């Protein structure tokens, strides 16, 4: 099951030094790391590495998630050999695709498609994005929504830019007064903000992003 995606809009292509810091961050946060190309990472990120437990409610913090890599295979927990599979431990490592896109960076067509007609976003940003970083969760539990916000905040502090998130009906009023919120597009479809904003929003009870 795919999960939510957050976007970091960039006013200029990241420098080689920033890309190096970006890669180092992903290596540091990840329990499993694959670099598909420079700036494109397939990772598993432990909730502990993000400090996510401080943002999760008790029922979400300890509920046993199903390991994403088991697919539709049914394995009765009582039939597992002790030590072979710790469900709680495995499930606290959440899968993400985190990737830079734009001219000469990769995924140019996707970047163009996502930014083809967004004058309302540009008016809030105050600049036309040249590149972007997508942070895409591969699962859709509430923990994945919180982890996506916290991971995006961490990436944002390294690469710069502005975070962009879709809003559902009624969310605009809830986020309008949060610290680091930079603006909401006409029609209340998108909110833009800083890393501080994402962390503040993730702390709301029942927080969820648009899938």
Image (spheres, rainbow, N blue to C red):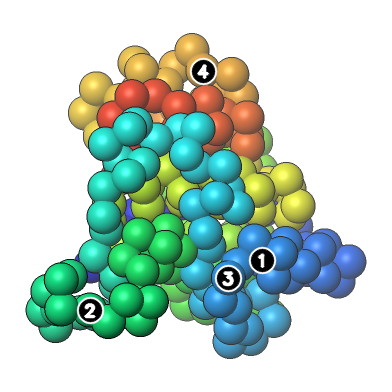
Neighbourhood count class around disc 3 (C-alpha, 10 Å): few under 14, some 14–19, many 20 upward: some
Mark 3 or mark 4, which has the lower sequence index?
3
Q: Are discs 1 and 3 less than 8 Å apart at CB?
A: no
What is the secondary structure assignment of the residue under circle 4?
A: loop
Of mark 4 and mark 1, the one earlier in the sequence is 1
Look at mark 4 in the image and give the residue it sits on.
Answer: 178
**Lower sequence index among marks 1 and 3:** 1
Closer to the camera: disc 1 or disc 3? 3
Q: Secondary structure at mark 1?
A: helix
Residue of label 2: 80
Nearer the viewer's eye, disc 4 or disc 2? 2
Q: Residue at x 64, y 61 (%)?
A: 29
Residue for badge 3: 31
Q: Is residue 13 visible?
A: no
Residue pictured at 26% horizontal, 47% vertical: 63
Instruction: Name which quarter of the figure residue 157 lies in.
Output: top right
Tell whether 17 sits left or right of 3.
right
């Amino acid at each position: 099951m795919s999960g939510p995606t957050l976007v970091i809009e960039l006013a200029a292509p990241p420098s080689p030094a920033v890309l190096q810091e970006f890669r180092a961050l992903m290596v540091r946060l990840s329990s499993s790391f694959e670099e598909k190309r420079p700036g494109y990472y397939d990772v598993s990120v432990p909730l502990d590495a993000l400090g996510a437990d401080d943002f999760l409610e008790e029922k979400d913090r300890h509920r046993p998630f199903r390991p994403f890599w088991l697919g539709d295979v049914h394995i009765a927990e009582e039939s597992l050999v002790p030590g072979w599979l710790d469900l709680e431990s495995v499930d606290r490592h959440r899968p993400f695709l985190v990737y830079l896109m734009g001219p000469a960076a990769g995924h140019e067509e996707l970047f163009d498609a996502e930014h083809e007609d967004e004058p309302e976003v540009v008016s809030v940003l105050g600049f036309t994005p040249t590149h972007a970083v997508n942070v895409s969760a591969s699962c859709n539990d509430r923990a994945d929504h919180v982890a996506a916000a916290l991971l995006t905040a961490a990436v944002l502090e390294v690469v710069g830019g502005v975070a962009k998130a879709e809003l559902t009906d009624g969310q605009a009023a809830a986020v309008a007064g949060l610290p680091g919120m930079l603006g909401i597009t006409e029609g209340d479809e998108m909110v833009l903000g800083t890393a501080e904003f994402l962390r503040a929003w993730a702390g709301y009870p029942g927080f969820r992003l648009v899938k």
